[in-house]
């Protein structure tokens, strides 16, 4: 197996979109499974077919990051996986804190996706005295009182926010007071105000559900229109 280490991102353009990064992560997951299955080569068409993405989009995404593969031959699965993993991997393992130990917070702590070589959850925070000091899925829950100091002591630089909407901004303000947080994954249904230089990604599950339901409605409507046209043509 090829040794994988983090390396700088050799971007050909000044910016790369979140959607592109999402596809790169999907490519890596696919390639991990293919490598485990013993696959040696793969084409952009095969990647696209497996993920429901146009092969031209696959080639475009990979071209942002350098030259991969050979025309007519395809990509070496181990080599492409190594290159993607090296590009996506951080230079150091990120240490993450989770703020808000309600049902969603506890579910996230127990999720296998948050056990990774690239990052680790090192602490949870809550205001509930019955939870403070206890361990949840192997991680200790700390008090929100003095959170910025605890963040400094534990070397936390990324937060996941799963607090109720009314408490989200004040929790973030307290956590950011020490200036050690670089990024926030926000699961609360509110837009957070943060200092310049702090990245925030919002994950609003209800919005994602609404988007899905809209697409289903749209697809159903299109099918009915098509069926109506076909009926008229037959008549």
Image (spheres, rainbow, N blue to C red):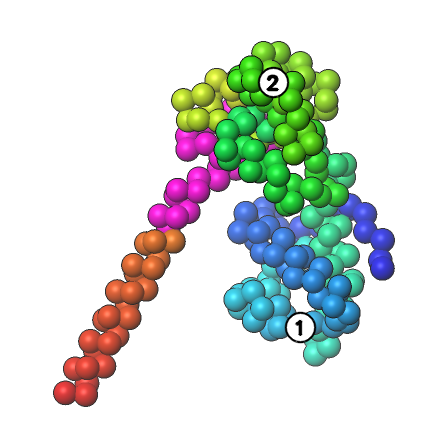
In this image, 81 relative to 56: left or right? right
Question: Which quadrant is the N terminus positioned in?
Answer: bottom right
Q: Secondary structure at mark 1?
A: loop
Q: Position of residue 167 (x, y in %)?
A: 45, 21
Q: Secondary structure at mark 2?
A: loop
Q: Which residue lies at the image location 53% right of the left edge and 22% below the top edge? A: 172
The residue carrying mark 1 is: 43
Which badge, 1 or 2, comes first in the chain's sequence?
1
Instruction: Answer above or below: position of 33 versus 230.
Output: above
Residue 116 image label: none
Q: Which residue lies at the image location 67% right of the left edge and 50% below the top edge? A: 11
Out of 18 and 212, give the one closest to the viewer: 212
The residue carrying mark 2 is: 132
Q: Position of residue 164 (x, y in %)?
A: 44, 26
In this image, 101 relative to 89: left or right? left
In the rendered structure, does residue 197 fall within the stretch colored magenta? yes
Report the magenta residues as a range.
Answer: 183-211
Q: Residues within 10 Å of mark 2 (few under 14, many from 20)?
A: some
In the rendered structure, does residue 121 fall within the stretch colored magenta? no
Quadrant of residue 96 within the rendered picture: top right
Q: Position of residue 4 (x, y in %)?
A: 81, 51
Q: CA distance from mark 1 to mark 2?
A: 51 Å
């Amino acid at each position: 197996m090829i040794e994988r280490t983090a390396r700088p991102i050799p971007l050909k353009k000044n910016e790369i979109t979140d959607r592109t990064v999402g596809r790169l992560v999907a490519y890596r997951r696919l390639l991990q499974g293919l490598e485990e299955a013993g696959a040696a080569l793969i084409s952009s068409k095969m990647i696209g077919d497996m993920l429901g993405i146009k092969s031209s989009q696959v080639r475009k995404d990979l071209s942002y990051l350098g030259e991969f593969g050979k025309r007519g031959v395809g990509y070496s699965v181990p080599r492409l996986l190594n290159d993607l993993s090296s590009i996506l991997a951080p230079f150091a393992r990120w240490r993450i804190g989770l703020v808000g130990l309600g049902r969603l917070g506890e579910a996230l702590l127990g999720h296998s996706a948050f056990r990774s070589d690239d990052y680790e959850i090192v602490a949870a925070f809550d205001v509930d005295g019955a939870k403070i000091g206890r361990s949840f899925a192997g991680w200790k829950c700390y008090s929100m009182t003095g959170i910025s100091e605890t963040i400094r002591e534990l070397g936390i630089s990324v937060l996941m926010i799963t607090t109720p909407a009314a408490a989200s901004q004040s929790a973030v303000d307290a956590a950011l007071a020490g200036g050690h947080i670089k990024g926030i994954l926000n699961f609360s249904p509110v837009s957070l105000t943060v200092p310049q230089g702090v990245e925030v990604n919002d994950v609003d599950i209800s919005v994602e559900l609404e988007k899905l339901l809209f697409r289903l409605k749209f697809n159903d409507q299109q099918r009915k229109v098509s069926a109506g046209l076909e009926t008229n043509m037959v008549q």
